[in-house]
Amino acid sequence: MKRTQATAWSSKDSAELYGIHQWGKGNFDLSADGNVRVKGQFPSGEVAIPLIDIVTGAKQRGYDFPLLLRVENLLDERIQLLNESFATAMAEAGYRGRYQGVFPVKVNQQCQVIREISRFGAAYGHGLEAGSKAELLLALANLNEGGLLICNGYKDREFIDLGLWAGKLGYRCFFVIESPTELPLLLERSKATGIKPLIGVRIKVSVKVGGLWTETTGDRSSFGLSTAQLVAVVDQLRQADMLGCLQLLHCHLGSQIPDIEEIRAGVREAGRFYADLAEEGVPLQYLDLGGGLAVDYIGNQSKQSHSRNYDMAGYCRCLVETVAATLDRKQVAHPTLITESGRATVAHTTMLLFDILDVLRFEPLSLPENCPADAPPLVARQFVLHQQQQEADPFLTYNEALANRDRIRELFRQGELNLRQRSLAENLFLSIARRVTTELTAASPDAPGLNELRKSLADIYYGNFSVFQSLPDTWAIGQVYPVLPIHRLHEAPIRDGIISDLTCDCDGKLDCFVLNGGEQQTLPLHQLKENEDYILGVFLMGAYQETLGDLHNLFGDTNVLSIRLNEDGSFDLVKEISGDSIAEVLSYVEYHPETLFEDFRTKTEQAVRDGKINLTERREILDQFAARLRGSTYYKRCGK
Ligand SMILES: Cc1ncc(COP(=O)(O)O)c(C=O)c1O
């Protein structure tokens, strides 16, 4: 479908273009009048609420962009899906054990997320995984009654003591031994407190998995015991007469693993460790297979890094069947299976919504009808290329125009061409490049090089957000998220753009997008309308982003709203958190807002004394200063 103003365009075309039925399956769709809707599942059926209605409600309550929107129903649905998919897989495979998930706190530590996981997960005994003392404390306070508490990562004496006391209180708290040096300390603290720990051992499986973290998987993973270290730990526990404490085997193959066959190979290897330890008399009862369950950010069900070639049901079947088959060969009892699925639990539940403040277009500003008589020869040649119609080989024209442009710039640097001549030449080049791109897009949309050309001409849409605060993974690891306008989707998006954030940093941009079931470097967008917000959403971004985000350029936390969709099609705001004020972010970097105000007030007083401003102006300036300190770090579109 061609995206031109003249062609008829509908929401269906947008759904196909942005792939919403693929990556947003079951959670998001488009209404006929062009709005993205979030869906909730209820016994009486499905409800779908336009995001634009939620945004309007937020604005009426005083929350401006950018806005982080969390939908609690989606979080509940993910926990339910994970637990019920395992239950189904186990029933189908005749598995003689159960599944108990834990949520790795590091994937999203936000209080309302952890509380909801614990509350809704209680029905399934869905527990928590902690990797630091701070995470342990919040987990202890929030864990539901039946949930497991898995302690990974480095542990010092304070960490261990707290975990031991938790065990005494009745928590099923596992200390997972990640390195051989941890065991002596654990044994010493156990002796000192008289409390026996529940122990797990984390092994390194040799299978390497693909995706973004492939280099840290297999033998080179930072955590876990080698086979020789595992054997030594087992022997030490036996000698200390504490082998009975070793009840859990742990491995973590990696995060966002795209290929199910690699998962199967890793699980088979972990199963072999489990079987042989059990045969040796280690009283194992739990097999924890860590994270790795991927999210299909692109929605094309492939082995690409941002996708996966399996679904939730397939993942569960793979784990259950592989463990059962591996253990059955040695007649070892089926363990309770644990996964630490983080990304797949929370990614879908949260989206970032922001408005566009301005657009920079790469287009000729104005061109004369005829070439000026005094135009230098190269500029005159550009004029000929500009007037040419429908060339045989558009790329030939483009390449000549590009070479001419570069020579013209060189002549300008040498003082051979003046400013006006260069300006005309630049306008001519843009006109040629635009015409060639339009012709190629119509004639051969897959022409090699066309994407690059399109990217070089793409508009820059300035988004009211900071990549470093809200989407750090796009900058740090090239993470791709679905991005699209949340309204006007029944209109053809006739422009191609990339998105720049508010930071003065060339890395502060989004320039890789999910489109037509693949990745592309420009995003189809609409033209801005005067006095009307143009709102974009970044979807599936609920994992890892919130606490990784930083204060680059002092853009602070955004407003956060958690909503719950109701069966009658309404929604409730269940939690509202105002974003950082400027005073707050300044205090994070050790400024005292009161002192700043005082210092500035002194300067305005001096300005009055010097006759630069009068007293009314002084008051106006100080009022503005004080109001900005209280206000948001983000911007308002001109005229608002
Ligand atoms: C030990 C451990 N468990 C679980 C996870 C969560 O992984 P994912 O988000 O892929 O489910 C991680 C993240 O890398 C991890 O290191």
Image (tube, rainbow, N blue to C red):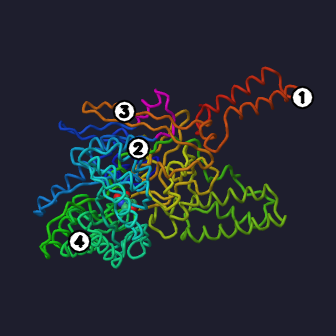
For disc 4, the neighbor class at 10 Å (few under 14, some 14 to 19, many from 20) is: many
Q: Earlier in the sequence, mark 1 or mark 4?
A: 4
Q: Residue furthest right?
A: 610
- Label 2 residue SS: loop
Among the two numbered marks 4 and 3 on one chain, the one whose residue lies closer to the N terminus: 4
Q: Secondary structure at mark 3?
A: strand
Quick check: can you spot residue 298?
no
Which labelled disc corresponds to residue 489? 2
Q: Quadrant of residue 230?
A: bottom left
**Mark 1: amino acid:** Asp
Does 448 lie within the magenta span? no
Between discs 1 and 2, the one toward the N terminus:
2
Spatial CA distance of label 1 from label 2 is 57 Å
Along the horizontal axis of the image, is 348 left or right of 431?
left
How crowded pointer 1 is (Cα within 10 Å; few <14, some 14-19, many 20+) is rated as few
Callout 3, which amino acid?
Answer: Val
Q: Which mark is residue 274?
A: 4
Q: Which residues are magenta?
A: 52-67
Judging by the rendered image, the residue that carries numbered circle 1 is: 610
Which mark is in front, 1 or 4? 4
Q: Quadrant of residue 86?
A: bottom left
C-alpha span from label 1 to label 4: 81 Å
Q: Amino acid at mark 2?
A: Leu
Pinpoint residue 379: horizontal percent, then vertical percent: 74, 63
Q: Quadrant of the N terminus?
A: bottom left
